[in-house]
Image: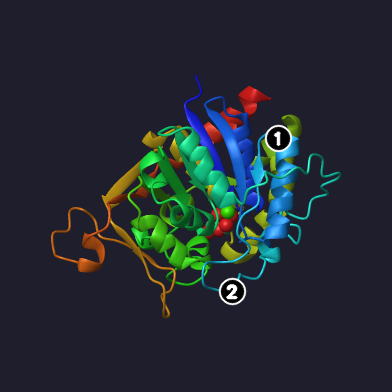
Amino acid sequence: MTQHKVIYDTDPGVDDAMALVFQALHPDIELLGITSVYGNATIDTTTSNALYLRSRFCPGVPVARGAAAPLHRAPPAPLGWIHGDNGLGNIELGEPGDTSLDARPAHQFIVDTIRAQPGEVTLIAVGPLTNLALALEADPEIATLVKQVVIMGGAFGTAGVLGNVSPAAEANIMCDPDAADIVLGAAWPVTMVGLDVTQETIMPNEWLKDFGGHGDAGRFVWDVSRHYARFHKDSAGLEGIYVHDSSAVAYVLAPHLYTVRKGPVRVVTSGIATGETIQKPVTMKAPAPDWDDRPAQAVCVGVDAAGMLDLYKNTFFKAL
Ligand code: RIB
Ligand code: CA
């Protein structure tokens, strides 16, 4: 029986795409839907990429178009130098295939799907959290009906990890800090898979090269990651790529690979530290009113990175 029924909220995006293929290939995941959001590229591009990826790797899965901008701020400029002008590493995409969209906006698709299967649905969100905040605004009760929410986002200073779009902020949170603070304050079980663990998990180029000989999905992973790898070489001197979005999927599939710390989380929404995520660990007894009336969420502070890479590679090599 499928273990995880997933709605994937995403801004594809190279690492988003690699994480979608990971889910499409893994037997323990049933994709209930893909919801697009702005972020790595405009909503038009991320939605078009979601449709392309659905056709190529998981035909028949519904795609619902999401928010074009944050709740109260202007949308970010597309990140062409990171994800390519087309959002997928500037690879040739060919014919779009099935371009059918669900009639509902992403947040309504999320509400309806959770209500249709109470207690069953896992939300994996790997872009700005605007769609999730809109879903909570439309139907706050979904917080009690979802199985779990796993977010790629945040940076909590473990081992000195900073933000990646400012010293304080990780990109997904920075795009819509207001939405992030709403999502983290809701009474649903959230696990944050942030830079503390995603920057500890690196796919070396030599390791990725092996995928090229493993079917269409493997070849796609190699091709789509090349532009992204050049960004990592130029910006961080890496001979490989940080594993951001696939780490959120790995947490759902194998939570034992991660060490989590519990406690309420706040997001800074103004000033120079906008987008910073700050957790008050449950072990901290000092009163902190801005945290104390919010639910404790889980933040990943450690990872078995080799175990995560093995999980990703075995998923592809067994399936192909
Ligand atoms: O900070 C990394 C995150 O921002 C990833 O989800 C990447 O796809 C971008 O959305
Ligand atoms: Ca993403």
Residue occupying image coordinates x 63% and y 48%: 104
Q: Which mark is residue 74?
A: 2
Q: Percent from the top left, x then y, of residue 290?
A: 25, 67
Q: Percent from the top left, x then y, of residue 259?
A: 33, 43
Which quadrant of the view contains residue 206?
top right
Q: Is residue 270 left or right of residue 88?
A: left
Q: Is residue 146 visible?
A: yes
Marked residue nearer the N-terminal end (1 or 2): 1
Q: Is residue 55 left or right of residue 287?
A: right
Q: Find the distance from the CA under tag 1 to the CA under tag 2.
A: 32 Å
Q: Percent from the top left, x then y, of residue 59?
A: 72, 33
Q: Is residue 299 left or right of residue 177?
A: left
Q: Percent from the top left, x then y, of residue 276?
A: 40, 68
Mark 1: few/some/many CA within 10 Å (<14, 14-19, 20+) = some
Q: Depth check: give the residue in front, 204 or 76.
A: 76
Image position of 237 with respect to 320: above or below: below
Q: Which residue is mark 1?
A: 57
Q: Are marks 1 and 2 in contact (CB under 8 Å)?
A: no
Q: How many marks?
A: 2
Residue occupying image coordinates x 21% and y 61%: 292
Residue occupying image coordinates x 17% and y 53%: 283
